[in-house]
Amino acid sequence: MKKRNVCVLFGGVSPEHEVSLRSAESVLNHLDQEKYNLYPVGITKEGNWILFGGKDYSELPTGSWRDHPGNRNAAISPIRGQGLLSFEGDHVVRERIDVVFPVLHGENGEDGSVQGLLQLAGIPFVGCHVAASAACMDKCLTKLIAGMTGVRQADWELVTREQLRKHPEEALDRVESRFSYPVFVKPAGTGSSVGVSKARGREALLAALENAVRFDSKVLVEEFIRGREVEVAVLGNNTPAASICGEIDAGAEFYDYETKYLTDTSTLYIPARISEDAAEEVRQTAVRVYQAMGCSGLARVDFFVGFDDERVVFNEINTLPGFTSISMYPKLFEASGIPYSELLDRLIALALEARYGA
């Protein structure tokens, strides 16, 4: 069988740059090189594209990949048929790419921007198309679309950077008139819990809002849901399927960026410690949200499940979830009978099946 040429994009101009490096290390180490020719392309925080010339992918999380002597500047051409271009002195090397795996999280990677480039280039890619990527990245749009389907979700209030700058007291009053403390404060367009805070009073709410608007001009303030944090992985194009449910016990105030990636206080339970009926409702709701948002390829869908009544409440959806060694998405499918390497094979097959831009 002819080997496929797979370009793995990683890094990116994003607050989640470091998470992407760790995800890409895992993906590159699990892609079967008997099946694929790998072209790892890193995007620096400054926006430079580099075709990584090394074979030791442990260099990615440390940052040393940027200085490898075999590196070449690179770009994916938007002109159809040109593929991956790399630059060696006065020469341009062109590689035909069969599929791109954008292991990019958050801004400039998960929001439809890279997906738009790949659509223009006519190159199939893993994950959601432009519109679904953009809509899922914006938590406000996600809330509006999911709400139209009747999915139960946490009540929310929108605060903009401009409102906070001009009328901070009015913004605080509006939130307090709707919710009791504590509340969660989230930038509309980040993942990995970047910029997310839990506020227990007015002073903490103001600080949380000021922190969140550093990352986005729109901020959601959500009611607190007392329940377990339950996640489910979804895979597929026209007929998506959900994995077994997993549960996160953060061991902290909530599952923030530090708890996810920098400490070992959290505990994962696979399967989640919920009833079979609640688990089935989570799985069905996840597929329902996935289809309503127009997703394809993959997504991780997050919920709260009430401690007492097991009420299922949709939280958010992530179209390019973490693929690190401790990430829930691959762990959930591994527990569902699909090992990591096979999962990557399926994602690439789904990308080729969809043939975006072809």
Image: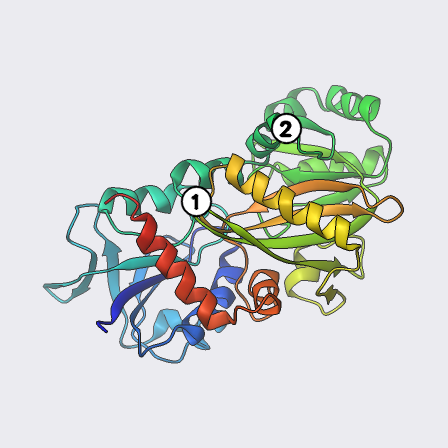
Which residue is under mark 2?
147
- Dividing the picture into quarters, in which one does residue 270 lie? bottom right
The mark that comes first in sequence, 1 or 2, is 2
Which residue is under mark 1?
238
Indicate the secondary structure of the residue bearing disc 1: loop
Within-10-Å neighbours for mark 2: few <14, some 14–19, many 20+: some
- Residue 241 versus residue 40 in the image, above or below: above
Residue 227 - label: none
- Residue 228 versus residue 40 in the image, above or below: above
The three-letter amino acid code for the residue at tag 2 is: Gly
- Dividing the picture into quarters, in which one does residue 259 lie? bottom right
Q: Residue at x 61, y 45 (%)?
A: 286
How many callouts does the rendering have? Answer: 2
- Say if residue 79 shows up in the picture: yes
The three-letter amino acid code for the residue at tag 1 is: Asn
Q: How far across and how far down the image is residue 328, in percent?
A: 61, 62
